[in-house]
Structure formats: C-alpha cells, structure tokens
Amino acid sequence: FAPSPPSPRNMVATSKRRNYRKTFKTPRRPFGKERLDQELKLCGEYGLRCKREIWRSQLMLAKIRKSARVLLTLNEDSDTRVFQGEALMRRLVRYGLLSEEERKLDFVLQLSTQKLLERRLQTKVLKMGLAKTIHMARVMIKQRHIRVSKQMVNCPSFMVRKDSERHIGLSVKSPYGAGRPGRLARKKGAAAGGDDGDASD
C-alpha cells in the first residue's frame, strides 16, 4: 500500500520562505525636536528618500556596536574575543569604516551614522564628480547609469567597499558614457537632420 502524494495545500511553498525581519527601528520618542531637525538635515545632505533610510543605518550601527560591547566584556585572551573581534575589524576596515590604525574595539564604539552614510554608493557617485548634485546621483543610480566594476548597481544605499571605490564608473550602455544616445537626444538629432535636409532643398 503506497502512501498518497501530498496535496498542493499541504506542500511546503519554498518560494514564500523569506526573511521578514525588520531592517529598521523607529525612534522611541517620535516628536523630539532635536532629533527631527537632525534627521531632516541628514535627509537633505545625503539625498535620502525618507527617514527610514536613516533608521536602517542606525540599526546597522547599533548591531555593530552591540557586538563590540559584548566582546569588550570578555577577557583579552579569550578565543571568542580574538576570533570574532578580528572578523569584525576586518569587515569594518574592508568597508572603509575604520582605518588600519584603528583596528581596536574601542574605535568601533566611536562610529557614527554619518560614517555609514558616507559609504553609500549615492554619496560616492557625487564625491567622484559623476553627478552634479546628490539628488542627480540617486536618479543616475536608479536609472542604471552606474556600475561598480563590471556589475551594474541600481541601489543607492549599496555599501561600497574600500577596494571597489576606484571601480565606480558609468555603465557601458549608459548615454552618459559610450552607450547609445537617449530618447530625447535621438529625437533632437532626427529633428536637426530633418531641418538640414529642408534647408538644402
């Protein structure tokens, strides 16, 4: 007697297995004036879409600092502190959040939200002169004009590694680079060509 196959209702839907953990944490006091002013300033300075992008960076920083605080409570000769501390330092140095001289857990506690926002691709595109404003940098990334090495990136919050900074450039197919001209440029070119033809007649 063979068991009957499971019905579609009882089968595990693997496509729906996703991690729905929250990536940001809302402030405890939503109407603090100083915090509201500071967040508004950061939104304008770094060209953020909403304050959720700030809260996401703050949660990421809080997790990093919590790991450092836990490791600092351990003995310096502890294997856990040696291995996990070195891994944390290596990751932060790779992303340019710490320099080689600052490879200590004490410096991790001094990290700020601005330091994380400086490592975003949107900020790097502006600093490299590929865009005239921070908002233009965001539009260029979303419209797929920017690549990191050979990979096109359309996420403004992409965290750029220190080694990848020199590989940021215009996409191969971008009209700003060597790609085909955009729709309006082609339209103007066709109109200019038509005017020249009428003038020659």
Image (cartoon, rainbow, N blue to C red):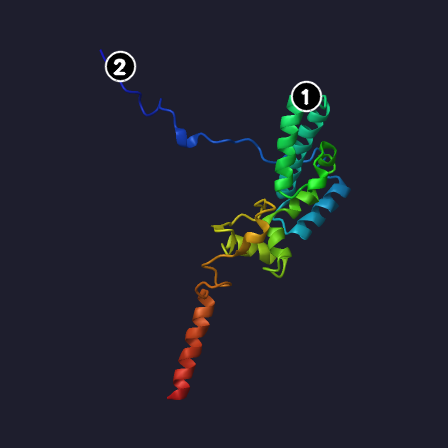
Does dot 1 land on a helix, a strand or a loop? loop
- Residue in front for this viewpoint, 142 or 68: 68
24 sits left or right of 15 in the view: right
Q: Amino acid at mark 1?
A: Ser
Residue at which label 2 appears: 3
- Residue in front for this viewpoint, 102 or 29: 102
Between discs 1 and 2, the one toward the N terminus: 2
The image shows a total of numbered marks equal to 2
User: Is any atom of residue 130 visible in this view?
Assistant: yes
10 Å neighbourhood of mark 2: few (<14), some, or many (≥20)? few
- Residue in front for this viewpoint, 115 or 188: 115
Query: Residue sitting at 65 percent across and 46 percent down?
Result: 117
Screen quadrant of the C terminus? bottom left
Q: Residue furthest top?
A: 1
Residue at which label 1 appears: 78
Residue 3 occupies quadrant: top left
10 Å neighbourhood of mark 1: few (<14), some, or many (≥20)? few
User: Is any atom of residue 112 visible in this view?
Assistant: no
145 sits left or right of 71 in the view: left
Percent position (x, y) of residue 67?
66, 28
Residue 85 occupies quadrant: top right
- Residue in front for this viewpoint, 31 or 20: 20
Percent position (x, y) of residue 155?
53, 47
Query: Residue sitting at 41 percent across and 87 percent down?
Result: 199
Percent position (x, y) of residue 31?
73, 39
Q: Amino acid at mark 2?
A: Pro
Q: Do the residues bearing badges 1 and 2 touch, measured as CB atoms within 8 Å?
A: no
Does dot 2 land on a helix, a strand or a loop? loop
The tag on residue 43 is: none
Q: Is residue 84 above or below residue 51?
A: above
107 sits left or right of 196 in the view: right
Q: CA distance from mark 1 to mark 2?
A: 54 Å
